[in-house]
Image: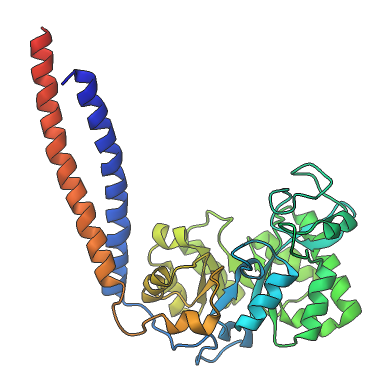
Amino acid sequence: MPSWGCEKEDHIMKKVSYVARISLIIILISFIISFGFGGTRLANGNVASASGEQWMQNRMIAHAMGSVGGMSYTNSYEAFMTNYNRGYRLFEVDLMMTLDGKVVAKHGWTKKIQPDLPVKSGHKPTLAQFKDALIYGEYQPLSWEDIVSLMAKYPDVYVILDTKETDIQKVKAQFAALVSVANIVDPAIMQRVIPEIFNPEMYDAVMEIYPFPHKIYSLYKTLASADSIVAYVKAKHITAVAMPVSRTIVNPTLIQRLNKLGVKSYVHTVNNTMMMNGLQEIGAYGFYTDAPRGPDKLLALLKNGDRSTTMPLLCILLICVGIQWKYTRMSKRTKNRLKVTKYAEE
């Protein structure tokens, strides 16, 4: 075989080996945490048996108002109604400001899900332009006024706010607008609004606008260490933390440390029950999800008190070990062939 052929084969196997090694690390961390530290297992049902703040009795959060028609991130009226009827009572919504200073449910200013917006991607429309452009051509976009009206109509609903902004002045303007609209309909609605807090500066700015009784510290925008996160939630008496799945890998003991403080961890975005099972094993309390099932159906699939994820993980572990072993053998053979080819060329 020509030397370039050997080198190409070796390059491919290096890539495969790299993926296998990363997979091994992730799986081993899962085993160590699950069997070494022991997870906090929770009762079945979306409404948990544990005492605490009422909104946190819901373990499942409808992410971006939940999925509808197989679509996620719509933040639409149809998504809200579909998932309310599925049994969700805790909703997360993405909020942004329009060109004319109105708060609307939107994840980002892209035309991908709203192709009829009469502005370029990345540019803000007016409220009227936003409302006139259907999502995926069929779903109704929501303004904050619409969401407040839905909360007034459905008094058992809680809404988590992912407000996107991190600039403090913009944060203040956005929250002032949120409070102003809610006060017109019913000031008590703000008691069921839960802001995601991204950093200490945002906490101070938000609490200056309105003394929210419920907050959730969201980690997806921060590189803060596990020690500083634990210290901060303890100092501010924060009772819930939201984190991406990646944070459970970077800081594998963080959830356990938060559990010891009585702080509940919600992980996002998780749509697979096997993944939920694994995260529950290490102590995760709840999940942001786009899954098309209702919360009770999802949680009924989580096998509490057993190791239902052990066998699949073990199989993957063995496959990764096999790939690594195969790479080691092929690498040795490739090096030997390269030596033979080199001598032959000389």
Q: Quadrant of residue 274?
A: bottom left
Colour scheme: rainbow
Q: In the image shown, does 148 or 39 lie closer to the viewer?
A: 148
Q: x, y percentage for residue 19? A: 31, 46
Q: Nearer the viewer, residue 66 or 267?
A: 66
Is residue 88 in view?
no
Q: Position of residue 9 (x, y in %)?
A: 23, 30
* Residue 327 drawn at (x, y percent): 18, 41
Is 243 placed above or below 56 here? Answer: above
The relative height of residue 276 versus residue 59 in the rendered view (above or below) is above
Could you tell whether 55 is left or right of 37 in the image? right
Question: For the point 82% across and 72% down, which residue is it?
Answer: 146
Number of marks in picture: 0
Q: Position of residue 138 (x, y in %)?
A: 74, 62
Q: Is residue 146 above or below residue 133?
A: below
Q: Is residue 231 left or right of residue 181?
A: left
Q: Please name the residue shown 26% across and 27% down the image.
A: 8
Q: Residue at x 78, y 65 (%)?
A: 140
Residue at the spot 61% in from the left edge and 62% down from the top edge: 72
User: Where's the C terminus, which quadrant?
Assistant: top left
Can residue 175 be seen in this snapshot?
Answer: yes
**Which residue is farthest top?**
346
Figure quadrant of the N terminus: top left
